[in-house]
Image (cartoon, helix red, strand yellow):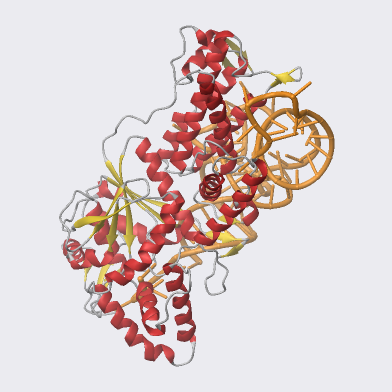
Amino acid sequence: MREMIPLGGFLNFVYEPAYLAAAASTPPKPFPKRPGKIAVEHTSVNPNKELHIGHLRNVALGDAVARILDYAGFEVEVENYIDDTGRQAAESLFAIARYGEPPKEGEKYDHYAGRLYVRLHQELGEEGNKAVLEPEIREVLRRLEAGELRGEIEKILRAQLATMWRLGAEYDVLLWESDIVREGLLEKALALLKETPYVFAPQEGKYKGALVFDTSKFIPGLEDPYLVLVRSDGTATYTAKDIALQFWKMGLLAGLKFKPYDTQPSGRALYTSHPEGKPMPFGRASATINVIDVRQSYPQQVLKAALSALGREDLAKAHVHLAYETVLLEGKPLSGRKGHVVSVDALIQEAVARARAIVAEKNPDHPDPELAAEQVGIGAIRFAMVKTEPRRQIDFRWDQALSFEGDAGPYLQYAHARAASILRKAREKGLDPEAPLPEGAEKAATPYEAELAKALLGFPEAVEKSAAEPTPHLLAAYLLDLAAAWNAYYNAKQGGLPATPVLAAPGELRELRLRLVFTVKETLRQGLSLLGVPAPEVM
RNA sequence: GCGCCCGUAGCUCAGUAGGAUAGAGCGGGUGCCUCCUAAGCACCAGGUCGGAGGUUCGAAUCCUCCCGGGCGCACCA
């Protein structure tokens, strides 16, 4: 520290540039391991149609949070719930069987399923059709619950996974709803609950014949605190299955079996629950995070209530609903029926096409323009989805989401590529940016280096805050600040001449600056990676 | 009706465990490529932080009420 200046009732500490520069000359490292396993469930898209931009927010948010928690030292298990016994999946499969037409040339299977699903709903909307078709849909539902149509669901799921993987999102395990039911977890969960005074079957009144959960002790203020778990016709509600899943996640129930499913693009293994699998150490988490939109707040409260009903207040507290607001498209709610939707695949295609045009314009000599276009296109849309606080609505606008200027993913990527370019040139000159700072070189630091160093040193705190909330938008804001500080440093002028050249800097200042540029590049790369945004070496 | 969330510059948003002249981007205006990528940088204009009370030495931030907007309150998933 150099001096303290009292001003307006505050003490201002002025640090020595050398001290700051030395502190910022080492790239950040992942946090030390912490106890506890966190299960992060995200995506969990109905396996019956293609993803749209509402799902995109879920995937981007969930994937970023999982990456941040992992970096922050937690053991993280990423789970994707496959609702293969739901109404929507049944309707898509029924539609495919009913219309019997193959996918169009080049049509992705999830888009194909979604198209026929919409067609079925048009037919169902016509007079008298519902009564005729309903028994047939119910038969599909029954076969789904028996696990007979798993292969059909998988065709759709595979197509959806291709989209998630292209976005850079990966998972550890797929949890199939039909497995949860068939392996008896639902029954076990209900048995546990029936031992409590809160779950019972009323003998009379509007809930006669059903199994209900009296949540009044846990969720005060409800007009009707009774929640149906098993309908009077004997079928379980979605919430009941969700409770069973939650109990399994937290180790209150066992019984699921697993087998390898696929190897994901990064090389990470993906497993799936499966009746013919074997027991594996999935689940048994000490904390759970469900990434689900805010409209599911009540069912998520019920999950906590169910844990409380078992006397497990500790587990109820350890469950977090990461509730995010819905996505609007050009100011209006998404609507499949009105055709007011954009699929993630179409969005990616458009983003990459625009990026391709800009790469060709800005850098016609790019060694791999297609790679850069993909990275920039994906980066732009992923950053757009995580830069806003989750509980705010996002108004998706094409011009903003695909902006390659200003507060956007490409701005960060550009800052990264710039740093990478300097390091590349340094290596061509025989310099080693990764070599430790020579003894005493930090003394060459000027106020320019001090400013940049201050920005660099904020990284761990930004990660910690993002992990604690949890929300990626705090990290996103930090990275924008860091990139701005770096760009300002890069562009600094004195008397019309560059004030902070790196490669042409005199004496030890060159080593110091090179080392700081290396830290900038590594910090940006790491930060972008935590948001799932690719970090191009050249763009 | 009951409950939860949001309201900050023309637009889109940061900032809210109380603290210094409230910050970005887009849009508008002006400069900067004989200099490591101008997808960048510097500067200007633009705000009664939805409104009114209150707590406090101090409030965008905490409390109360009100006004806008969104969402949830099914034997639907």
Query: Where B25 falls versus A55 (above or below)?
Result: above
Residue A81 location in percent, x, y?
32, 59
Instruction: Specify whether A299 is left or right of A179.
Output: right
Front-most of A317 and A473? A473
A369 to A234, vertically: above or below: above
Horizontal and vertical percent position of residue A434? 45, 21
Image spot of residue A276 (x, y percent) = 16, 62
Foreground: B34 or A436? B34
Identify the residue at image location x=61%, y=42%: A407
Residue A139: in sight, yes or no?
yes
Quick one: quadrant of the C terminus of chain A? top right
Question: Horizontally, is A1 left or right of A365 in the view?
Answer: left
Query: Which corner quadrant of the image does residue A180 belong to?
Result: bottom left
How many numbered circles are shown?
0
Quarter holding residue A307: bottom left
Query: Which is nearer the eye, A425 or A62?
Result: A425
Residue at position x 57%, y 36% in the image: A480
Could you tell me residue A481's position as x and y percent? 58, 33
Q: Which residue is drawn at 41% across and 62% down?
A: A160
Is residue A457 visible from the viewing direction of this image? Answer: no
